[in-house]
Image (cartoon, coloured by chain):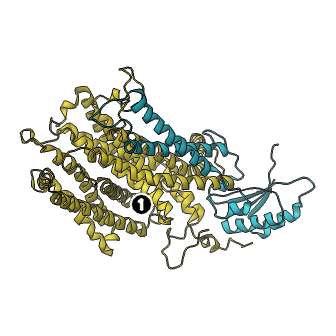
Chain colours: A yellow, B cyan
Amino acid sequence: MSYESPIREALVTGGKTYSDVTREILHPMENKASKSWWLAFLFSALVLGVWLFYVCYTFWEGLGVWGLNRTVGWAFDITNFVFWVGIGHAGTLISAVLLLFRQKWRMSINRSAEAMTIFAVICAASFIIIHMGRPWMVYWPLPLPNAFGSLWINFNSALVWDVFAISTYFSVSLVFWYIGLIPDIATTRDRATGMRKHVYNFFSMGWNGSTRTWHRYEMVSLILAGISTPLVFSVHSIVSMDFATSIVPGWHTTIFPPYFVAGAIFSGFGMVLTLLVTGRVILKQENYITMGHLDAMCRIVMLTGTMVGLAYITEFFVAAYSGVQYEQYAFLNRAFGPYGWSYWIMMGCNLIAPQVFWTKWARSTPWFIFIMSIFVNIGMWFERFVIIVTSLHRDFLPSSWTMYTPTIVEVGILIGSFGLFFTLYFLFARFLPTINMAEVKSILPTHSTSEKGETVHG
Amino acid sequence: MLLGIYDNPDATLNVTRSLKEKGYDVHDVYTPFAVHNLDRVLGVKRTRLSIAAFIFSMIGISTAITLIAYTGYFDWPINIGGKPYLHIPTYIPVTYELGILFTAFGMVACFFLVNRMFMGKNPDIMDIRVTDDRFVIAVNIHEGKTDLNDLSAIFKNGGALEVRERIVEP
């Protein structure tokens, strides 16, 4: 139905018909799970077990089992939180911003990217709860009239804004994802039998493909995209304000919101590439997630990586130019102090490494893209570590200067959070269509059916 | 009700157009994906969900402002770091987020409501393949008014794979 200029590369290759799309995308769901799926799932579940163990240990013993001290009050916990929230941003960017820009290549990757968003935000939110140390008081940042003297929460605090931002982001992303899933759940329902049919029937909400419904559905998707776009920019801006509204040198900068948003998109696309470069091969979806998709995502990685690098250099310049000696010291300490190594890992992975994507070879070699995407993930984790720990560990009073070393508990929770993420992701890949079939069908060129001589134009 | 089943969106669109031109009572067209222009050809009125979304965003924004101003200024002002109590710039983030939250949930609730969709609803499916690769045009038949032969001729000439009747419970 869609018109594509003949000089453009096809978005879906292989001359698929509509039923090919349905059959191939539902293939991993309708058949017995492969050995590789079980292996990957059980391994992730094992890592999730590590997470569960260390989180319970932390709750049992208290935050004292972490490496935090009086000077460095935030370290791995908030690093991981910002890291995971950042990962989530690519999903919303792909499904919302690219929808507004009418970028049709988003259609075969938006489902898995949105799923990634939701699972990443779950991981991020778990760190918020874990770092409180007393999870049974998790409702304290909510505006509830309380029994402790009619006190309300402080709406001037960036941390309260963050509570609203993250919970809005999670719930709106979930709704957006579910709305997109309904037609595909209906497709699954109509092919399923037995118990599976009942389950998919329940969640398909009686979808029957009526044009009236589609008309409203398109409007709802458009508006959800329209409100998710400012949402995705606002969420990471608000996360950055957790730092920027404080007076800690190295945090107190106005560049933080755009810098964090660029970094979030960068890290998110890194994770999308990690998942899709492997997923397209394992799920045999090379015709849907084509080299063109990988190429486009590599370009975005390069662009946002360069923006992030520009922000690093700008920060340095502004610190030097400001004439504030605390700022100047914070940045010199960041690059050449005891944590200098982490700064150079960050610079190397985020600014320098993505520059290889200027070459066509790098953008069209999947194994190389995979390695680079791992670099991006590592680099962006270290960016948050650098910002948080190097700014804190040498504060205004030299007498309180100290070093921070994570304990096994913190490392275990970090590694375990990947288990949480991948367990959820593998479950998603097993039980829900990983590619938005309805949207992919709408971008198939109509002649893919007429070539077979089945079509008569009326 | 007479159903014409197609495998191609262009044919579906063309047949729907000629049916509408000849004044048939086209009940609805069922497609596996959103076929552009089909809603216009079918004469579906532009949905008012965007207006609903705007109203919900206003409700969200006013709820947020009321909540923050009531708790932070009227009910129990607390001096934290000397920050002002009634300070509009610090209201912006929460107001913004709640505006988006209310818009999303309100609009989606309206979407489900107008479509009469709810979890666990049993679908009224014209043809089970409609969510896969078939396009179904459903035309209401009025006793004595609708020319069945002409209608099925239009369906067939338009490239219908199958034309069949469906009894609708009143």
Please say if B5 is above or below A355: above
Picture quadrant of residue A449 = bottom right
Give the left or right position of residue A140, taking residue B16 as reference.
left
* Residue type at the position of mark 1: Arg
Of the 4 image quadrants, the one containing the C terminus of chain B is top right
The residue most toward the left is A399
Picture quadrant of residue A412 = top left
Give the left or right position of residue A24, taking residue A87 as reference.
right
Please say if B28 is above or below A417: below
Picture quadrant of residue A363 = bottom left
- Residue A245: give x, y in percent of width and height: 28, 45
User: In terms of depth relative to the viewer, which is nearer, A145 or A167?
Assistant: A145
User: In terms of depth relative to the viewer, which is nearer, B137 or A200?
Assistant: B137
- Residue B66: give x, y in percent of width and height: 48, 35
Please say if A340 is above or below B98: below
User: In terms of depth relative to the viewer, which is nearer, B137 or B66?
Assistant: B66
Give the left or right position of residue B158, taking residue A178 as reference.
right
Residue displayed at 36% across by 25% down: A151
Residue A34, can we see it? no
Residue B24, can we see it? yes
Residue displayed at 12% across by 45% down: A394
Question: Callout 1 environment at 10 Å: few (<14), some (14 to 19), or many (20+)?
Answer: some
- Residue B87: give x, y in percent of width and height: 37, 40
Give the left or right position of residue A428, taking residue A451 as reference.
left
Count of all numbered marks drawn on residues in the image = 1
Circle 1 residue: A280
